[in-house]
Amino acid sequence: MGVLLGLVPSSSAPAPPPPSAVSSSSSAAPTLGIVWTPPSPPDSALSALDRIAATGATAVRLTRLPPDTVAGRADSLGLRLYVDLPIRHASAASLADTLSRVGPTLTRLLALADRHPSITHVGLAQGVDTTVPQTCEHLRRWASRVHGRSPSLQTYYVTPFASTADRCRDAVDRPLLDLRGRPRPAEQWRAWPAHTNGVGIGALGTWTRPSASSGLQVPHSAERQARYLETSLSRLLNSSRTAPPVVFVARWQDAATPPLSARHYGLHDAAGIPRPAARVVQGIYADAQRTFAFPDGSPPASSYGLVLVGWGLVAALGLLYARSLFVRETVVRYFAAPGFYRDALRNGRDASFGANGLLLGLVGGSLGLTATRMAQLAAAAPVTEHVLAALPLVVRTALGPGIRYPVLAGLVVGGGAIVGLLLWMGVLVATARLGMRFSGAQGLMLIAWPCWPVLLVPPIALAAGPGAPLSPSLFSLMLLGGSALALLSVSFRVLFDHWRVCDPPAWTLLPLVALSPLVLVGTSLLGAAQYGVPFLFLWRLAVYA
């Protein structure tokens, strides 16, 4: 859950924003624009810019520094250019270093702006942690540096955070909101205080999924994307209400390497073929058409595979209890008479290898089902790509396929848990045999039964989702807290039972504890933090974005 590095700001005092930055959004017609990444070939870039201007757009938000030829063409077309600096999804602690590294880029941008009046705004950061004052101070100093060098330029940042969490709105001339994928973007923009100057929309749109068929009834189809933009733009640009001073649709063309490979926001695909949303944007921007018709298509068939897997786990657990005398007796001993449970574990005469092995398999299946459901929820959440973008590349690369293919996430988590528990069991059995006879069936019994809390999670996971009895956010909080308690409970109970039953030598305690789930997970989190994963930033993204 990762980190980008940040900037050393200028020490000059903040300059007051230009008068145009604080004018009311209702005093002039809104600026309508599109987010665009200029392609490297000059001819392709100029051709695309001409097509953007032909849609009726009056501004373009560039995600990287434009070449001189593109800025010159924007001058002749009368476009306003908002140019992003390459600072994205940085935590507050890393922002200063990151900003210092892009100092040469800012110098080139300011020199380019001196030659081309179309460059009117400089984007200081995108998706950084604007919920803490430390970030605001860095942005304020950097904005002062821009104003000191070019007083006519205005500054902005793009934020996914809600109005109640963002604290840096006064550090720049114009905060821009990233509202991609939000169900009610107009309401979210209007939730910002009316006295906040110049708050615009830096990214508006929703994604299409490559595998989606056509039709309005198909989630994340090209037609659904078009209808989303039609509805959102109509509500935002309603003449009877105050409109944002600037609105950028995200984006002109699909990004080459998006954080989630299954999310494509472009009005055009990677080959430049327009989607229906391109017609919507051109019609509304040019004020030529406000209502559009699209085919309904056929809704996708409902999938109950995960529910059936969940019921299969419940049925297998019920059959195991009904048909195995060992399981029924062990349930009573484990929960009501732990001393008798440890006696049975020590003797091992009644320990059933098959029953304990099946129980461990059910534990792995429960974890796999929960991971699959979590991946499904993450794939549908707009904030997921912000969280992924804040991760180190190696972590993002590992998590991306699991979110795109939830079953893969389930197989990896469930299978990995079983393998890890079996390795731990092997060490437990080996140390037990230093002083007594201890079979594999006893080892399975030792590690499988303390994992019973995991069996409670699948019904809760299947009840979570948008519009379901349990909201995804509440389920995530429950899972976060429950996981910590389960790791502590499982690790302690297994080690305690092993010590009471086997009385191993004292020197074996270190490897046994080191391989316990609690220590392994805790060590992994500490290692991730040392590697650069900003857990506080990720938490704020998940909660406030």
Image (cartoon, grey):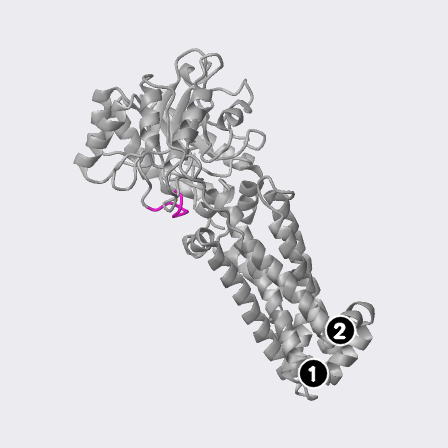
- Which residue lies at the image location 33% right of the left edge and 16% below the top edge? 287
Work out whether 158 lies above or below 302. above
Magenta stretch secondary structure, dominant: loop
Q: Position of residue 375 (x, y in %)?
A: 51, 51
Q: Is residue 68 visible?
A: no
Q: Position of residue 17 (x, y in %)?
A: 43, 20
Q: Position of residue 353 (x, y in %)?
A: 64, 79
Q: Tell me the distance, in whole angstroms, between the alpha carbons under discs 2 and 1.
A: 27 Å
The three-letter amino acid code for the residue at tag 2 is: Thr
N-terminal of the pair, mark 2 or mark 1, is 2
Front in this rendered view, residue 64 or 110: 64
The residues colored magenta run 257-263
- Which residue lies at the image location 61% right of the left edge and 48% below the top edge? 476
The three-letter amino acid code for the residue at tag 1 is: Pro
Residue at label 2? 330
Residue at label 1? 505
Front in this rendered view, residue 376 or 499: 376
Label 2: state its secondary structure.
Answer: helix
Work out whether 407 lies above or below 493. above
Left or right: 129 in relation to 211:
right
In this rendering, which labeled residue sits more in front, label 2 or label 1? Answer: 2
